[in-house]
Image (cartoon, rainbow, N blue to C red):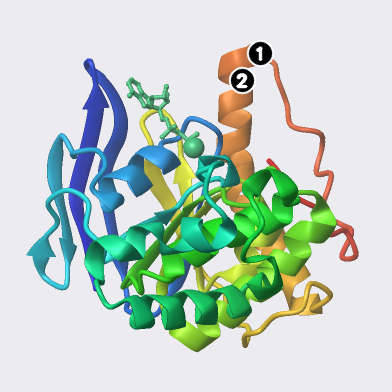
Amino acid sequence: MIDILDLNKSYDEVEVLKNINLHIKKGEFISLIGPSGCGKSTLINIIAGLDPASSGQVLLDGKTIKGTDTDRIMVFQSGALFPWLSVYDNVSFGLKNVCKDSKEIKRKVEDVLRKVHLYKFRDKYPHELSGGMKQRVSIARSIVMEPKILLMDEPFSALDEQTKMLLHNELQEIWLETKNTIIFVTHNIREAVKLSDRVVIMGTRPGSIVDDIKVDIPHPRDTTNKDLYYMEKLVFSKLKKEIEKVAREELGDGYKFEKDRFSNDSNNTMGGGI
Ligand code: ADP
Ligand code: MG
């Protein structure tokens, strides 16, 4: 479905992405994970068509993507809601540009609002909502467009752990129902492993793909699923080198990641951000 071929991106002579090759199948949920500054947002923005590649190609169903399109929709952070519009109007805003049938719009918007548990709150304004509810609105207004691909750049990073857990479950349900292809950027190992079919690990300077790990655990996945812990450990072990590299560049050559902190503890959940 998506083929990224020999993609490179530079800003003012600085190589940000180098030789990215990635193939994503229809209906796949993939996460991009890597240290801060490795080019995750740059890559997802190029896929969205918000930013051009310097060289190489992104193909969607065999056709080169040119700019943004409703077949690829980005779920922006909750702060990107229109504060002067109600929940309903935020969700219907984009749809009104592509659909002129007001009954159809109402049906679709109400259906999506039920999916994200916000139907009761359809007349509220963003300032009346919690962080989790705002992010549900962001998701709703993206999926209401019925895109082929949902692009998510750290959508839950500002939320507390409990809300994050609820949204993970809801996103899994939505994904299982809509069969969307999802590209999900995160720096949270547990989140990546819990949600994705594949975790693509990126390294830095220049940003490149260093590993591609299949997570072969049936969906929907529960946070307490033991197999997830083993996958977390595996992803962490692959990421460790990249994290250390960034820390050395920032803090000096002598820097050493805390000695095998996670390697002998099978109960350690490693919690989160890198
Ligand atoms: P990530 O999302 O993985 O944290 P980004 O894709 O945001 O990383 O950034 C990757 C690198 O590209 C960083 O070093 C950043 O400073 C640089 N960069 C991103 N956008 C621009 C831009 N518009 N102009 C110049 N440099 C940029
Ligand atoms: Mg980013």
In the rendered image of this protein, does residue 53 appear above or below residue 217? above
- Dot 2: element: helix
Checking the image for residue 248, the label placed there is 2
Which x, y percent locates residue 217? 63, 83
Amino acid type of the residue tagged 1 in the rendering: Leu
In the rendered image of this protein, does residue 130 appear above or below residue 203? below
Q: Quadrant of the C terminus?
A: top right
Checking the image for residue 122, the label placed there is none
Residue visible at 35% across and 68% down in the picture: 149
* Residue 28 image-quadrant placement: bottom left
Residue neighbourhood size for the residue with mark 2, other residues' Cα within 10 Å, grouped as few (<14), some (14–19), many (≥20): some
* Residue 167 image-quadrant placement: bottom right
Q: Which one is in front, 108 or 150? A: 108
Amino acid type of the residue tagged 2 in the rendering: Arg
- Dot 1: element: helix
Which x, y percent locates residue 200? 46, 58
- 204 vs 136, left or right, is left
Q: Which residue is mark 1?
A: 251
Residue visible at 26% across and 60% down in the picture: 97
Residue visible at 62% across and 85% down in the picture: 219
Q: Mark 1–mark 2 contact, CB under 8 Å?
A: yes
